[in-house]
Image (cartoon, rainbow, N blue to C red):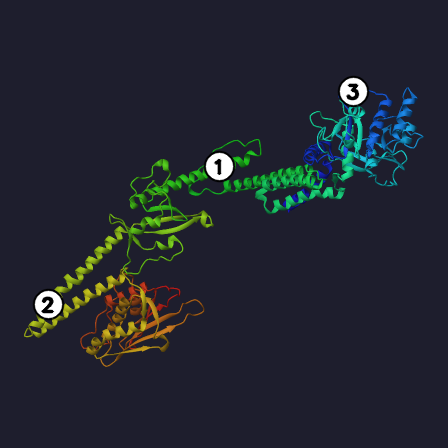
């Protein structure tokens, strides 16, 4: 709200202030300077119809000191009469009679030979006279009677003394006198009656703002004495407007004009020549009416304020551009249309608006920074905060935010140093990369792992050595990638480089590691950075290699003697039957134990090869594998698969899943009485209320003796890595399937396989009612369940 009020005040008060300043002397002088420079550029060619007969220094030397006798002027007019000029302005004030009345009569007689115009001499504005020209001193009556026209010849200098304007009508109300040049050019405007004017008010109407043809001497000039002696051809004088006046320095009226040139003044006769030329050709510098002038001053300010609100960051270009546009428009208007638009007031207003806008923006930013510095200084430092040093409170309130900011910077510097040291001390390799994957910094463990050679020194502050700095990490480690065990190719279609770094990598010195990346800092991609961790897996892979060697030992060195014993027994059928039976039974048990241990080690390992697997095919394969075992025990194995579950596809390791189901089937066959059946079932279970995901349920049911609740609980919740509980077999004399159960390593294998597939395992049993063991596996795209 405060910001809106400030902008409204700018939009209202600043234009009003500039409208008031536009008429102050300082701004008027600056506008006048620009006006005069443009006026010189807008100069026009002097009219060839105007000729000045100059009372110059040459004429003064030839004819003697001024004033000359009126008989001399009479001879000049007599010399001009045969050339038939269009009109003659005798720019002389003939208000006093000469010493010889015959000379006045001679001059009056000569005036009757051609159209002569005479100027009026200004008197005091308050001096009322009884003649027909009040406020002026007219020529003598004889001269006025012979003249074609008599009018005023006064200019109206501006406040700086420069004549830029004359008025075509001037005088008292109802007694306005026309400008003498307007009489010569036949451009006398009608007078306007001012009802508010009093009889003593001096009025000026119809301003003519002059456009000058050029500096002094722009109009063609001939010396007075040359015309008097007949040295000027009559063709040069014929049908011309002849202006007779003084041009010699110190003689006659000398007027300060914008185009006066080096001498600074222009003779009055040349000013009249410019004025008559303007009247003849309709030239005039027009000005805007007051309302349009106010709009010219105010609209640029409002436009600038609107642009600043929308594009506040470009305040200087906006203000400078609009100020330049005002100056350019003013120049074009003067040069092309001869219209004067004063540019100083809008330009000054734009400068003041820029200063106010910049000041308010800086003030608001300072207030914001002061508040944020206080917030930052007030944040708790945590574990690594130290007691602040005691310092006296500053006398200047402006020093408070400075102290708060200094303290916050010091805390951040301490935290940065702590983080740098902690990063270098970490045993895990770490790199800092940009959004494109280029390495910027890291710790010593990372550089040793990647074999960079040179290590960063303390002065480098964790910066990467030259061998790695700027190198793209994906390209650096691409040759080190270890092909996955499943044979699946690495991802190459990932949009971001971090999505293509999954897997393991091996250095030339057999060190194995993987990559984990996390983004930090800004939300914009160009401002983001990445922390890349390279945890080393060398020890784990070495342990896995040793486990594989142990499994090979079990597979070969432990199984081989048992197979040899069985072979020897088969070669000696005549040996004692009881001994052969006992030896064979124990050898088979040892061999089964070795195979079960191998299955359990494989189930607990990470050597799973997940692929799209047809569940129905897995179940039928498991049933086929136990067929001979079931026949030997007199048990039927029946598969019951729902119609809608027959084509179900899972992401699974088919071999290990088949092995787990075979273990469940073998256990069910072993504990089922002869002549009974074992059911292998499969069904699809949909999710409930959006909580459980859809899954496939595989069950194995027997008709054995069953288990008590305590035995079932011990079976399902045995600690991981420990064999399932084993209880005695059926006692001598008991019927098969009526004793307690032995699960052993087989059930541990089942439980490990189900957990690796993110499934759940359960069982239902009661003494004398048989046992049903089921496992539930989530379908692709569903949420994994918690293993039981």
Residue 513 visible in image: no
Decide: marks 1, 3 in contact (CB < 8 A)? no
Residue 716, by quadrant, is bottom left
In this picture, residue 633 sits left or right of residue 61: left
Which residue carries the number 3 mark?
Answer: 60
Looking at marks 1 and 3 on the same chain, the residue that comes earlier in the sequence is marked by 3
Callout 2: 10 Å neighbours few (<14), some, many (20+)? some
SS assignment at label 2: helix
| Corner quadrant of residue 158 | top right
Sequence-wise first label, 3 or 2: 3
373 lies left or right of 657: right
Task: Provide residue 637's location: percent of width, then percent of height.
Answer: 26, 78
Q: Which residue is mark 1?
A: 407
Residue lying at the far bottom of the rendered structure: 675
The front one of 632 and 342 is 342
Above or below residue 502? Residue 175 is: above
Q: CA distance from mark 1 to mark 3?
A: 89 Å
> Residue 565, which numbered label?
2
Label 3: element kind: helix
């Amino acid at each position: 709200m405060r910001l809106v009020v400030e902008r409204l005040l700018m939009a209202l008060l600043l234009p009003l202030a500039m409208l008031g300043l536009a008429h102050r002397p300082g701004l008027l002088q600056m506008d006048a300077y620009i006006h005069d420079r443009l006026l010189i550029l807008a100069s026009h060619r002097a009219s060839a119809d105007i000729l000045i007969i100059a009372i110059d220094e040459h004429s003064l030397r030839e004819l003697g000191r001024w004033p000359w006798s009126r008989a001399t002027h009479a001879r000049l007019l007599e010399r001009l009469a045969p050339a038939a000029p269009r009109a003659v302005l005798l720019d002389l004030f003939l208000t006093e009679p000469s010493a010889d009345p015959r000379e006045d009569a001679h001059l009056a007689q000569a005036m009757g030979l051609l159209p002569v115009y005479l100027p009026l001499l200004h008197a005091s504005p308050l001096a009322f006279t009884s003649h027909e020209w009040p406020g002026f001193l007219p020529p003598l009556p004889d001269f006025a009677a012979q003249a074609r026209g008599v009018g005023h010849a006064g200019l109206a200098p501006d406040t700086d003394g420069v004549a830029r304007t004359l008025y075509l009508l001037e005088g008292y109300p109802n007694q306005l006198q026309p400008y003498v040049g307007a009489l010569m050019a036949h451009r006398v405007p009608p007078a306007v009656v001012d009802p508010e004017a009093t009889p003593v008010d001096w009025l000026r109407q119809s301003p003519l703002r002059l456009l000058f043809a050029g500096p002094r001497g722009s109009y063609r000039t001939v010396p007075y004495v040359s015309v008097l002696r007949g040295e000027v051809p009559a063709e040069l004088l014929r049908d011309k407007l002849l202006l007779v006046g003084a041009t010699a320095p110190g003689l006659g009226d000398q007027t300060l004009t914008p185009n006066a040139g080096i001498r600074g003044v222009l003779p009055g006769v040349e000013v009249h020549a410019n004025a008559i030329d303007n009247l003849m050709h309709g030239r005039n510098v027009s000005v805007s009416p007051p309302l349009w002038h106010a709009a010219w001053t105010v609209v640029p300010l409002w436009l600038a304020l609107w642009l600043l609100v929308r594009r506040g960051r470009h305040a200087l270009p906006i203000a400078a551009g609009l100020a330049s546009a005002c100056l350019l428009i003013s120049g074009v208007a003067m040069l092309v249309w001869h219209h004067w638009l004063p540019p100083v007031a809008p330009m000054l207003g734009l400068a003041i608006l820029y200063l106010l806008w910049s000041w308010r923006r800086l003030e608001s930013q300072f207030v914001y920074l002061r508040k944020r510095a206080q917030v930052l200084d007030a944040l708790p430092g945590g574990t690594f905060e130290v007691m602040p040093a005691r310092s006296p409170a500053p006398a200047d309130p402006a020093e408070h935010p400075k102290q708060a900011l200094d303290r916050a910077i010091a805390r951040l510097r301490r935290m940065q140093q702590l983080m740098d040291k902690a990063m270098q001390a970490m045993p895990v390799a770490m790199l800092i990369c940009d959004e494109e994957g280029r390495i910027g910094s890291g710790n010593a463990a990372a550089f040793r792992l990647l074999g960079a050679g040179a290590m960063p020194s303390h002065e480098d502050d964790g910066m990467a050595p030259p061998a790695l700095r700027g190198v793209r990490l994906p390209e650096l480690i691409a040759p080190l990638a270890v092909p996955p065990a499943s044979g699946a190719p690495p991802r190459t279609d990932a949009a971001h480089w971090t999505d293509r770094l999954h897997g393991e990598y091996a250095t030339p010195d057999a060190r194995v590691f993987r990559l984990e990346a996390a983004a930090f800092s800004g939300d914009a991609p160009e401002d983001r950075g990445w922390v890349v961790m390279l945890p080393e897996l060398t020890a784990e892979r070495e342990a896995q290699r040793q486990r594989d060697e142990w499994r090979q030992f079990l597979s070969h060195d432990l199984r081989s003697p048992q197979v040899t014993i069985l072979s020897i027994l088969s070669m000696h059928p005549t040996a004692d039957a009881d001994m052969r039976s006992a030896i064979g039974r124990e050898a088979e048990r040892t061999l089964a134990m070795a195979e079960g241990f191998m299955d359990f080690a494989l189930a607990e390992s990470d050597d799973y090869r997940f692929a799209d697997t047809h569940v129905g095919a897995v179940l039928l394969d498991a049933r086929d594998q136990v067929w001979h075992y079931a026949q030997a025990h007199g048990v039927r194995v029946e598969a019951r698969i729902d119609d809608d579950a027959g084509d179900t596809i899972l992401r699974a390791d088919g071999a290990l899943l088949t092995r787990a189901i075979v273990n469940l089937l073998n256990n069910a066959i072993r504990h089922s009485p002869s002549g009974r059946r074992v059911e292998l079932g499969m069904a699809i279970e949909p999710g409930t209320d959006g909580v459980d995901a859809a899954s496939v349920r595989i069950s194995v049911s027997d008709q054995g003796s069953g288990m008590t609740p305590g035995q079932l609980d011990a079976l399902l919740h045995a600690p991981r890595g420990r064999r399932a509980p084993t209880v005695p077999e059926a006692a001598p004399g008991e019927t098969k399937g009526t004793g307690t159960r032995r699960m052993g390593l087989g059930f541990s294998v089942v439980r490990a396989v189900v957990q690796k597939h993110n499934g759940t395992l359960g069982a239902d049993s009661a003494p004398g009612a048989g046992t049903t063991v089921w496992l539930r596996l989530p379908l692709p795209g569903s949420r994994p369940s918690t293993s039981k």
